[in-house]
Image: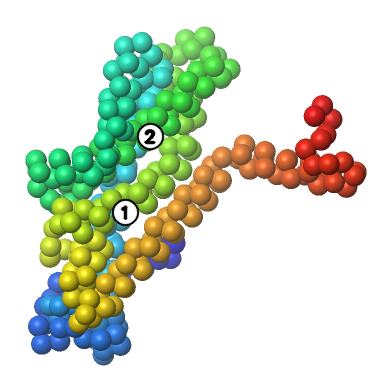
Amino acid sequence: MFLVLCFIFSYPLVTSVNPLAQDIENAFAPIGTPGHVLGTDNLGRDTFARLVLGLRTEILVCAAGTLLAAIIGALVGILAAYFRGLADLLLMRVVDIVLAFPNLVFAMLIVSLYGAGDLTVVAVCAVAFFPNFARLTYGEVLSLRQALYVESAELFGGTRLQVIRGPLLRGVGPLVLAQAFLTLAFAVGLESGLSFLGLGITPPAPSLGLMIATGQQYFMQSPWQLLIPSIVLVVLLVALGYVADWVRDLLDPRGVTRVRRGARMGFAQRRNGMPFGQGVGA
C-alpha cells in the first residue's frame, strides 16, 4: 500500500502525459495503444494518467475530510465524557441526531447549499464521520477517568486542560488513529458515490466515481472504461481495510497479548489432556 501511494503521488511529477488533454481522433483507443497503456476515454484522454491523478485527488480530499472528522469527533467525545453534565447532554445528542440520518442525506444537503467541489467533499466527510470518532473517544475517556494515572494527574494539581492534553489524549490517540484508517475507506466510498451522481469532485478533474459514471455511458464502445476504475476502487477499499486492521493490531498491544496468551493456554491444556477452555478456576 505504501509503494502504491508513493507511485500515485510521484507519477504526475515525472510523466509527460496530460490527463486533461483531449484528442477526439483517438477516442476509445484500446488497451496497449502506443502512448496509452490503458487506452483512452470518450474524449481521447489517457485513461492511465486520469486514473493516477484521480486516485491522488481522491485520497487527498478524503484524507483531509477524515482528519477534520477525527479532530472534531475526538474533541466532542473528550469534552462530553470528561465534563459530563450539560456538555455530555448537548454534545452527544448532536452526535445521535447526525447518526440518525444516512450519510447521503447530509451529503446532498451540503452540496445543495454550497455546490459540488473538493471543499464540499471535505465538509461532507467531516460531518458524516465525526460521530464515529466522538462515540469512540467518549467510551474510552469514560474508562480512562477511573485510571490511576489520570486520577494522579488531577490529585497533583493538574488543570483540566493539562489532563486532557496529557493522559487522555495519549490514551485515545491510538484508537483514533486506527479508526481514521478505517474511516478513510468509508470516505473514499462515499466520495466515489457522490462523484458518480455528479455531486463530488467536479470535472474536468478526474475521480474514480466520475470515471465509472462516464464508463457506464460508453460501456458498449469500450467496456474497459468502466471495468478498470471499478476494479481499482474495489482494490483500494480492500487495501485500506487491511491497513486499518494492521494499524489496529499494531496500536493495541493489549488485544494482541490477550490473543497470544489465550493461544498458549489452549496449547498447554491440550498437551495436558484437558479440554480446551477448562483450566484452573474454569
Q: Image quadrant for the C terminus?
A: top right
Q: Is residue 162 visible?
A: no
The image's mark for residue 189 is 1
Asked which secondary structure carries label 1, the reply is helix
Q: Which image quadrant for residue 57?
A: bottom left
Q: Is residue 190 visible?
A: yes
Outermost residue to the right: 272
Give the Cα separation between the discs numbered 2 and 1.
18 Å
Q: Residue at x 31, y 53 (%)?
A: 189
Mark 2 or mark 1: which comes first in sequence? 2
Residue 151: image location, x then y, percent: 53, 14
Q: Quadrant of residue 183?
A: top left
In percent of width and height, residue 105 lies at 21, 41
Q: Residue at x 29, y 80 (%)?
A: 38
Q: Please say if 125 is above or below 157.
A: below
Please report contact status of discs 2 and 1: CB closer than 8 Å, yes or no. Answer: no
Q: Which residue is mark 2?
A: 133
Using the image, determine if residue 118 lies above or below residue 21: above
Residue 124 appears at what percent x and percent y?
22, 43
Q: In the shown orientation, is residue 167 left or right of residue 275?
A: left
The foreground one among 223 and 199 is 223
Q: Residues within 10 Å of mark 2 (few under 14, many from 20)?
A: many
